Image (cartoon, coloured by chain):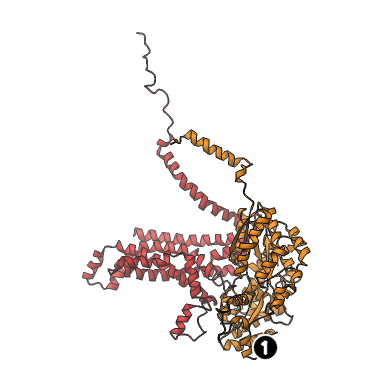
Chain colours: A orange, B red
Amino acid sequence: MTKINRRNFLKTTGGAAAVLASAKMPAIAQAPTEVHILRWNDFVPACDTYLRTKLFPDAEKALGIKVKFETVNANDLQARITSGIQAGAGPDVIMLNNNHPHLYKSSLVDVSDVAADVAKDQGEWYKAALANASSGGKFFGVPMNYVGGLNAWRVSMFKDIGLTEFPKTWDAYRDAGKKLKAKGFPIGQSLGQSFGDPVGFAYPYLWSMGGAEVDDKGKVAINSKETVEAVKYMTALWKDSMDEGGLAWDDSSNNRAFLAGTICATLNGASIYIEALRKPDQYKTADGKPLKDDILHAFLPAGPKGVFGLHLVQSHVIPTYSKNQKAAKDLLRFMQTKANYEPWFETGQGFYTPPTSGWESHKVWTSNPVMAPFALIGKSGLAPGYPGEPNAQAAEVLSKYLIGNMFAAAIKGQSAEDAVKACEGQLKSIYGA
Amino acid sequence: MATAAIPVPEGTIIVGKPKWRPLEGEGNLAMLLLLPTVALLMMFIAYPFVRGILLAVTNSKVGQMGEFVGFENFARLLKDPIFHAVVYNTFLYTFVTTIFKLILGLWLALLLNRDFKFKAFTRAFILLPFIVPTVLACFAWKWMFDPTFSVLNWMLFKLGIVAAGAGVNWLGDGDMAMLSIMIVNIWRGVPFFAISLMAGLQTISPDLGEAAAIDGAKPWQRFWYITWPLLMPVTMVVMLFSVIQTFSDFQIVYVMTGGGPANATHLFATYAYQLGVGTGLLSQGAAVSLAMFPLLFGIVIFQLMYIRRVETR
């Protein structure tokens, strides 16, 4: 046995250290570049499976890289990118929701070239996708998809109260909800502190009533007669027609409630319908028919200003700390190349709407009429901060849930005027008075 | 007589200065032995603390170093209605849960201190809520409070206390949500109180109680005049720990309500997290969590002084 003495120890470890320190590693240690991509836990699990088992392995072969795929709860994505940027190390590609890319703009790689390639091939970017991931023509994120938010509604329940289509105005919506709530099936709407549905409901509702956080010049304009009226109306609506537990709901609570048959309608992505479609034996109506045949999708009702929508836009960003920026860009380009994107989009069955106009007549929409309304969401959706820019301030308002909380505070009992005033104070401290 | 040099055989006698032996002095050795601990404290306590202070006086956001702005962040907090709610929530949360944890924990400790079958087993069992990882337990509780699937509401319904579909809106109503997270905190904290207080009870000699009983003291009097005062030092230390823990609680709120509905359950730690990590406003987040420091420091000083007084009495 060799005796380890000080001299021998120094010789061996010193040699190893010298190898490690030398810029050029021995050929044997040269592994392919690893690109670490972080996305949400998909609401359509089949899409995660598709990425894991098909798209990423294909990318590894085609690009000569290694892909490390990680998923987290969507509400934790911001925590991950913040800690990544502060630590200067973390995933090379991160998925972000809505206008969150604006918050991290200064630490994100310019991906305009990738975005240009996608648009060249697949049509123009829709308004909200463009606004959420770029400013002044420079892209700091590549939008991958919308998750359209439409009302999933139970055809049989609405038929029971004499309606064959989803209410077209807020008054009709309130009235229908009231009748159905009396039968034990209220409208279920999430208004908790969560990224998707509460936002997709509260913002368009406010816009349709004529309120907005800022005017088109970016000056705080929340404290208007219209907003106060909207808050008052919401308070009454909540009591009359809604499941009052909704204040605590996150983005998955309403899915569960709908699938369990306790609510008659909810604003959501198509994930509820897709889940019911996937398991017709598990999800049934009260009289034993498959739930999937009892669901249709409808846009939010119209207010005095018309119909509005805010649909979740999801983009991929590359933080500047990434040491594999080129490989990361290659991966993004690969993912959104038509041939690779299409099977993923089809796996989503319409849960995901492409962010460019070239897909509107795709067979995903035409083959299933229940999904058809989602084809058009890109045309109608606006970005948070409307009618101002969806800039970092609007992103801050969004991630503090100020608009949803203004309604929630009034529902909890604060007067509409006070709730609006409190929100105005918050907005002013963000936008500057 | 001429002095002749006495020949000294080489290498046998040491001549000149004594060798430098720095570790023989007690002070030096002590410093050296302390070094690892000091280094750890500097790294994990002093550095983050100082860094927190430095962040709180700048306007840095995620990815931007920011500039010195003095106390602007704190001034902003003073005007921030959410922060006001946070302060109120935290004090209420800490005060109510600590009282209940003390009462229930003491009660449990007194029961466990008696002799009964399966004593050891029961005592170990009691610790369960404390052992289960908090986040896991919170997810279970979240389901129990779920607006749609609440097993608690189902129970109330089966017991005929509420009508179908008219269950308690546990997490959806601001006050109820606060109550709900308090219940979970108490559930989790009682075992710590019970076990610590039981340890305290066991140091009290039973002779005292017996002597008092012979003198005709009723059980309640024996508790109030003998057990309670003797248990006081332990109680105060347990309370101190609990207050610190509860004041800076994070996991329960983060998992169960995310601070909602409409900020009704935000505590210092969760609001600081939402601002700093969620929204990327690092300096404002640091300011919120630093604002916790003087308040907590005040409470701790007060309690420590009280403990000293009790101990020297």
Give how far across and how far down residue B268 sits, in percent: 54, 65
**Residue shown at 42% from the left, 71% from the top:** B100
Is residue A103 part of the magenta span, yes or no?
no
In front of the other: A85 or A431: A85
**Residue shown at 44% from the left, 65% from the top:** B132
Crowding at mark 1 (Cα within 10 Å: few <14, some 14-19, many 20+): few
Give how far across and how far down residue A51 sits, in percent: 63, 63
Q: Which residue is mark 1?
A: A164
For the N terminus of chain A, give its image quadrant.
top left
Give how far across and how far down residue A95 sits, in percent: 65, 63
Magenta residues, start to end: B1-12
Asked if residue A405 lies left or right of residue A116, the reply is left
Is residue B6 part of the magenta span, yes or no?
yes
Residue A50 placement: quadrant: bottom right
The secondary element bearing badge 1 is classed as loop
Vertical relation: A313 (above or below) B154 = above
**Observer able to see residue A98:** no
Residue B265 placement: quadrant: bottom right
Q: Looking at the picture, which amino acid does disc 1 mark? A: Thr
Q: Main secondary structure of the magenta part?
A: loop
In front of the other: A212 or A147: A147
| Count of marks overlaid on the render | 1
In front of the other: A56 or B202: A56
Vertical relation: A356 (above or below) B56 = below
Give how far across and how far down residue A279 sits, in percent: 57, 76
> Which residue extends farthest top?
B1
Q: Chain of mark 1?
A: A
**Observer able to see residue A46:** yes
